[in-house]
Image: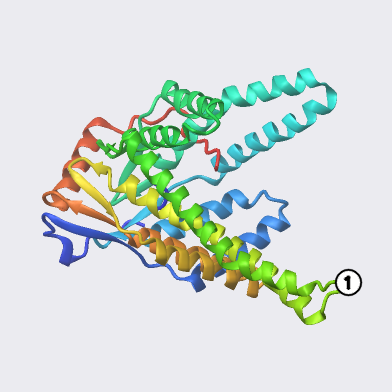
């Protein structure tokens, strides 16, 4: 639900019936670069205070650049609410670090307080984030309870740690189940039906691909490095310069390729999970489909890193737009019936029932 100005449907979509609508991203790296550089400079000048306004400005651009069926999403977040969330986070982190300087007991008490209140803060932040997102004038929302938040963000992480992270896929499934099942668009709820076994399958597949890649790299480079190392040392212990250089070069190349492979694992894992999560998510009777390809995502990730390094960081906003565009445009909505009728019915239900979201929605932890 992370990346969603409100326009009328174009004429070509006014009679959209059952079919597939693909999300589109109309933003550009050059436009976003101007927003990014101004946000960065003002955040530095204000010692971080402007970061809340920077987030609002960034989100408004990204949301308005994201379209479904010719209409854009809109972000309504308030910078003061975001600033409050960041102040709370700063106070807790600073207090936690300071408490241990006074006494071990006070430090652990502060740690316990952070653990106890964090699920509530995340819950309120989820409410804020979704309520301040809209599509065609209809707001999203989050109905999850505080009790569910404590189970999801406190109990399951604790059990996962006790299991030495063997329960990580279970925690991930419970997290997405909570986020998606409890989210809504107007009065229509999302639903999520992926099981724990499917998350274990995705995790094991990702880990298996990583291990196979590491083995191939080690076998491919290991024999070469060993041979060069043997040649580099003669019987009296002196190495020949050319052979020594070759061995060192091969070792550095081996480390570079290994690091590159481990870095490429993230987009592979991301692709597996994104496809799993969205292919099991519905909005009412409308089914989402995600078609990310790991090779394309890996290519984007690796070339982004190389470009960022070569430009000393100035390519960062362009890299963010490249990755975001691919992730957004890989997502489709299979419409069951007329989307216009669905929007009209949802708007009518919302107007009749009212938003009913006045409870502490002016807070965002800004995670």
Q: Nearer the viewer, residue 136 or 222?
A: 222
104 relative position to 29: left or right: right
Q: Nearer the viewer, residue 348 or 237?
A: 237
Q: Nearer the viewer, residue 73 or 329?
A: 329
User: What percent of the width, then of the height, locates residue 185?
Assistant: 29, 41
Q: Residue furthest bottom?
A: 242
User: What percent of the width, then of the height, locates residue 126?
Assistant: 45, 37
Secondary structure of the residue carrying numbered label 1:
loop
**Mark 1 closeness class: few <14, some 14–19, many ≥20 residues within 10 Å:** few
User: What percent of the width, then of the height, locates residue 161?
Assistant: 56, 29
User: What percent of the width, then of the height, locates residue 350?
Assistant: 25, 37
Tell me if residue 273 comes above or below residue 5 in the rendering: above
Taking the image as drawn, is residue 42 in sight? yes
Q: On the image, which quarter does residue 260 sit in?
A: bottom right
Q: Mark 1 sits on what residue? A: 236
326 relative position to 303: left or right: left
Taking the image as drawn, is residue 248 in sight? no
The residue positioned 38% from the left and 46% from the top of the image is 202
């Amino acid at each position: 639900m992370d990346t969603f100005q409100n326009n009328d449907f174009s004429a070509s979509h006014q009679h959209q019936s059952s079919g597939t609508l693909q999300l589109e991203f109309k933003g550009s790296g050059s436009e976003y670069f101007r927003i990014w550089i101004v946000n960065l400079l003002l955040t530095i000048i204000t010692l971080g205070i402007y970061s809340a306004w920077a987030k609002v400005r960034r989100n408004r651009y990204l949301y308005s650049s994201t379209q479904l069926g010719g209409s854009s999403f809109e972000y309504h977040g308030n910078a003061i609410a975001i600033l409050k969330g960041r102040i709370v986070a700063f106070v807790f982190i600073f207090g936690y670090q300071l408490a241990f300087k006074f006494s071990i007991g006070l430090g652990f008490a502060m740690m316990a307080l952070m653990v106890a209140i964090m699920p509530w803060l995340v819950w309120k932040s989820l409410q804020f984030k979704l309520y301040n997102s809209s599509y065609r004038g209809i707001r999203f929302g989050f109905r999850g309870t505080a009790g569910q938040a404590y189970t999801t963000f406190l109990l399951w992480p604790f059990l996962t740690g006790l299991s030495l992270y063997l329960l990580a896929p279970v925690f991930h499934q419970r997290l997405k189940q909570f986020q998606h099942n409890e989210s809504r668009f107007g009065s229509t709820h999302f639903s999520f039906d992926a099981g724990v076994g499917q998350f274990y399958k995705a995790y094991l597949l990702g880990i298996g691909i990583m291990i196979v890649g590491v083995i191939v790299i080690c076998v491919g480079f290991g024999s070469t490095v060993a041979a060069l190392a043997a040649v580099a040392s003669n019987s009296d212990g002196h190495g020949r310069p050319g052979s020594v250089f070759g061995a060192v070069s091969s070792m550095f190349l081996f480390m570079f390729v290994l690091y590159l492979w481990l870095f490429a694992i993230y987009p592979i894992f991301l692709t597996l999970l994104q496809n799993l999560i969205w292919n099991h998510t519905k909005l009412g009777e409308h089914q989402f489909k995600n078609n990310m390809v790991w090779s394309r995502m890996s290519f984007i990730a690796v070339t982004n890193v190389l470009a960022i390094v070569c430009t000393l960081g100035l390519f960062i906003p362009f890299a963010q737009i490249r990755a975001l565009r691919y992730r957004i445009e890989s997502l489709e909505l299979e419409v069951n019936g007329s989307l216009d009728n669905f929007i009209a019915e949802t708007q009518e239900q919302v107007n009749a029932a009212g938003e009913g979201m006045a409870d502490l929605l002016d807070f965002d932890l800004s995670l």
